[in-house]
Image: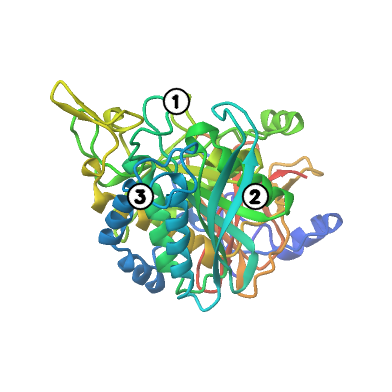
């Protein structure tokens, strides 16, 4: 089959024409488009489209990245360390020491950033009483600091970035000893605060939430509460990142990797239902969770010269048998992933501050790499700003299965964005870890591709008039 715009091609890896496809799919109620197929790349299966490319940062994003200030990040890490301990069970009413003093300082700084936003950003405390539970021996107030920068065009679409401001030493129940927590996790909180400061003066299309959460070391309490609140409110959280232990580029053996950050992203979804698991086993998709699509998006917009960083996507929910604040969001069916330094040094994490055998132990700021933290902040900024400037991830994406054929019918709902330009189909062979081909299909809600769904994986992403692209949505049978 050919379109009016393209000559005949001697193989069947082309789009069906609009007129032919429209007749064939009338019963599906789906609009179709036709597009010339580029020459296929070598490999199997052979199919339409062109090789996929990363999205380069535009002038606005490059300007934003230049404003990220390493000195401010260092000052914020050192200020958090100055509170002595930020243990969740430490003092909440001491103005100088403990988690309450840290909480109040973070709120004051976020409020100051919000003052420069022209009313678009608000800062507040989100508190609840955690009843006795694991590592919580008595009812305890747990408080998250939340700064919300409301979107200008799609305010109901939300992206969250977090770090946890509580800290600990060797004994997780020791709430009085000095627990500086410079890397774990003043570094992540400093990233979040710097992003809030820089972005407060700008106008994202979607809403961005900058949050410092508590209770992480005791069991992810603050973030789990926060995610449940968003779910109860029906919030459309389309991505969440936690920055936890992003302060050092030096491993325990002294080797350095100052230009890499790990991004942990689960495969099989944490909150997958039995029916969803059955479908996944039938059609594949173990490598195509919303978290994996989010990680691929981050690589495409933040692994470049503008950030100076390589994003190493790790195909795992978190480090081996460990966890972080993104898990509470995954439990609520929100796409979420974790940023962490490339190699941890456990002498400076969860350790009592001491000198033993001539070696300094403890999570102290002298073991942080502040230029590295600033580059991690740039990776986060590139990801968040690209998400908040692009259309939302397509919804209700399906592979239509009414016809038993060697081609693939895809359908989806049109997004509400006023600057939406259209959609692109991406595909790859089933053994490929990332999307390899892209097919622009225009402003339609369905298309037929002359490539078998048996042999390839497909996805759909939205594009605006400025070329900003959404994360990919992986289809389900429909």
Residue 8 vertical placement versus 433 (above, below):
below
How is the structure coloured here? rainbow
Q: Is residue 315 left or right of residue 378?
A: right
Residue at 42% of width from left, 28% of height from top? Answer: 174
105 above or below 231?
Answer: below
User: Is 362 placed above or below 58 here?
Assistant: above
Viewer-proximal residue, 197 or 271?
Answer: 197
Q: Residue furthest left?
A: 358
Mark 3 vs 1, N-terminal side: 3
Which numbered mark, 1 or 2, is in the foreground of this view? Answer: 1
Rendering coords of residue 390 (x, y %)? 54, 65
Residue matched to label 2:
450
Q: Quadrant of residue 228?
A: top right
Q: Position of residue 477 (x, y in %)?
A: 74, 42
Residue at 37% in and 25% down: 170
Nearest to the observer: residue 82 or residue 160: 82
Q: Are marks 1 and 2 in contact (CB under 8 Å)?
A: no
For label 3, the residue is: 80
x and y, in percent, of residue 299 in the image: 42, 50
Residue 359 falls left or right of residue 233? left
Residue 454 shows up from this direction: yes
Secondary element at image label 1: loop
Q: Quadrant of the N terminus?
A: bottom right
The residue that disc 1 covers is 320
Using the image, tell me which numbered label, if any, was put on residue 466: none
Q: Nearer the viewer, mark 3 or mark 1?
A: 3
């Amino acid at each position: 089959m050919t379109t009016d715009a393209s000559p005949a091609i001697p193989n069947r890896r082309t789009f069906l024409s609009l007129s032919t496809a429209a007749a064939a799919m009338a019963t599906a109620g789906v609009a179709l488009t036709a597009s010339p197929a580029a020459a296929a790349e070598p490999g199997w299966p052979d199919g339409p489209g062109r090789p996929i490319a990363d999205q380069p940062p535009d002038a606005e994003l490059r300007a934003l990245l230049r404003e990220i200030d390493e000195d401010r990040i260092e000052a914020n890490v050192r200020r958090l360390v100055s509170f002595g301990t930020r243990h969740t069970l430490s003092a909440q009413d001491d103005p100088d020491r403990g988690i309450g003093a840290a909480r109040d300082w973070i709120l004051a700084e976020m409020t100051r950033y919000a003052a420069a936003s022209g009313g678009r950003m608000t800062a507040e405390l989100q508190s609840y009483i955690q009843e006795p539970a694991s590592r919580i021996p008595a009812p305890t107030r747990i408080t998250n600091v939340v700064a919300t920068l409301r979107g200008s065009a799609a305010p109901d679409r939300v992206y969250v970035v977090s770090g946890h401001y509580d800290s600990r030493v060797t004994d997780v129940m020791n709430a009085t000893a000095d627990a500086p927590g410079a890397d774990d996790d003043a570094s992540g909180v400093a990233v979040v605060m710097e992003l809030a400061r820089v972005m407060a003066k700008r106008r994202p299309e979607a809403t961005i939430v900058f949050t410092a959460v508590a209770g992480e070391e005791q069991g992810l309490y603050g973030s789990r509460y926060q995610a449940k609140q968003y779910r109860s409110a029906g919030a459309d959280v389309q991505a969440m990142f936690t920055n936890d232990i992003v302060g050092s580029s030096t491993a325990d053996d002294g080797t350095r990797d100052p230009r890499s950050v790990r991004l942990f992203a689960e495969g099989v979804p944490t909150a997958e239902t039995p029916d969803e698991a059955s479908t996944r086993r039938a059609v594949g998709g173990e490598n195509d969770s919303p978290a994996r699509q989010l990680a691929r998006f981050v690589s495409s917009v933040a692994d470049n010269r503008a950030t100076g960083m390589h994003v190493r996507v790790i195909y795992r929910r978190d480090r081996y048998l460990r966890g972080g604040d993104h898990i509470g969001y995954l439990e609520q069916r929100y796409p979420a992933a974790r940023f962490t330094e490339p190699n941890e040094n456990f002498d400076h994490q969860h350790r009592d501050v001491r000198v033993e055998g001539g070696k300094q132990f403890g999570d102290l700021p002298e073991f942080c790499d502040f230029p590295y933290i600033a580059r991690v902040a740039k990776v986060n900024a590139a990801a968040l700003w690209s998400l908040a400037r692009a259309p939302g991830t397509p919804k209700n994406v399906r592979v239509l299965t009414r016809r038993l054929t060697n081609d693939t019918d895809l359908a989806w709902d049109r997004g509400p964005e006023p600057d939406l330009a259209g959609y692109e189909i991406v595909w790859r062979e089933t053994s490929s870890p990332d999307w390899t081909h892209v097919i622009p299909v225009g402003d339609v809600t369905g298309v037929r591709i002359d490539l078998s769904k048996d042999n390839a994986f497909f996805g759909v992403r939205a594009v605006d008039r400025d070329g900003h692209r959404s994360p990919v949505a992986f289809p389900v049978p429909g």
